[in-house]
Amino acid sequence: MIKPHIKLFFIITLAVILVQGCYGNYTKITELPKANLVASNCRAIKHPLGETCVPVKPQRIIALDETSMEVLLALDLKPVAATQPNIAGSIIPKLGKKAEGIISLGKESQPNIEKMVQLSPDLILGFSLSEETYHLFSQIAPTVTLDYIQTGWKDSLSQIAEITGKSEKAQKLLEQYQQRVQALRIVINNQPTKTTVSISRFYAGKQVPEFRTKYSFPGSLITEVGIPLPDMQNQLNTNENQPLVSVSLERLELLEADILFVALDPSAEDAFKKYHNSQLWQNLNVVKNNRVYIVDSSYWIFGNILAANAILDDLFKYLVNNS
């Protein structure tokens, strides 16, 4: 998600100034949405940073992160452009033709402001914007920001559906998802013993890996289908604002479970190899039992309805078909 920081503020401010100088029609472009959005053509939407008059049927939406992009695609609203994650993998290859044609605006932390202006959006949508970023983007088009809560992804889906007039579609998506959850839960409950699952993420570079808690996006999903996380992890994590706990090489026992999903960021293979080649890793029972599965951080770490269904696909594959 886009995080507020001073560097981003100055980059965006500079970009806006440059665009104003390079494009004589900039004022017309940025003022046109506001001038045309009369009361009959837009609805007032309240959000954490204020109230925005949003077109009744937005046609040219810019998604400021892949999570909001994912929601829009699920609602059959292809955004004209979106940013890419700063560190995690991009979910776009996973989505195939559904995401074809979406223009890249660069990384979440440094979106291409000039390109955003040129695209003449009628709505800009994203999670966790700072006040400075919100006000700058609002000069380009009506902008709405939502709080990002990893365990509250269903609420986020419903909120974006309400904003874009797709509430009925969102309800249908959630019903279909719950049917899949129930089907998997039945299989899990019929197993003779409970299978514990651990979720780890490995970064590129020297950043220490982690396990994801029940307060994370994947952890909440695992819990919803009735799969327990390891007791040791639950004992370490009692804070609902803590979606992850770092795991040093000396504390690898924290990853122990019946099944371990390892979510790799792009270029994280070397960091994973360092752990994988250690004797401590080789001593884990989950490793000895060959129940470690490499998965993609593009949908296992953050996401919404499409990512949730992709995780369910993996759970059916590894917990049901391989059991």
Image (cartoon, helix red, strand yellow):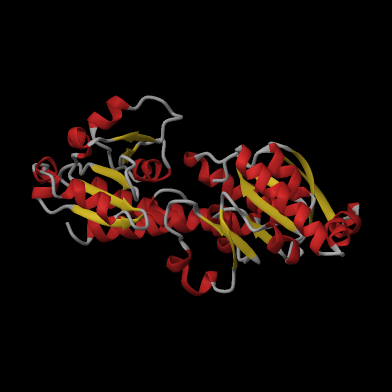
Residue 267, quarter of the rendered image: bottom left
Q: Is residue 135 left or right of residue 148?
A: right
Q: Residue at left 34%, top 60%? A: 313
Decide if residue 319 is in sight here.
no
**Tag count:** 0
Residue placed most toward the observer, 183 or 200: 200
Q: Is residue 162 left or right of residue 20?
A: left
Residue drawn 87% across the image and 54% down it: 34
**Quarter of the rendering containing residue 239:** top left
Judge whether 87 appears above or below 23 on screen. above
Q: Could you tell me which quadrant the C terminus lies in?
A: bottom left
| Picture coordinates of residue 31, whole percent (x, y) | 87, 56
Residue 294 image offset from top left, x and y in percent? 26, 56
**Left or right: where 288 falls relative to 321:** left
Residue 314: x and y in percent read 31, 58
Residue plotted at (18% across, 39% down) = 256
Is residue 114 visible in this depiction of the protein? yes
Which residue occupies 29% across, 43% down? 227
- Front in this rendered view, residue 247 or 271: 271
Q: Eyeballing the image, is 159 above or below 164?
A: above
Which residue is at the front of the view, 129 or 117? 117
| Percent position of residue 127, x then y | 60, 45
| Observer-nearest of 266 and 256 | 266
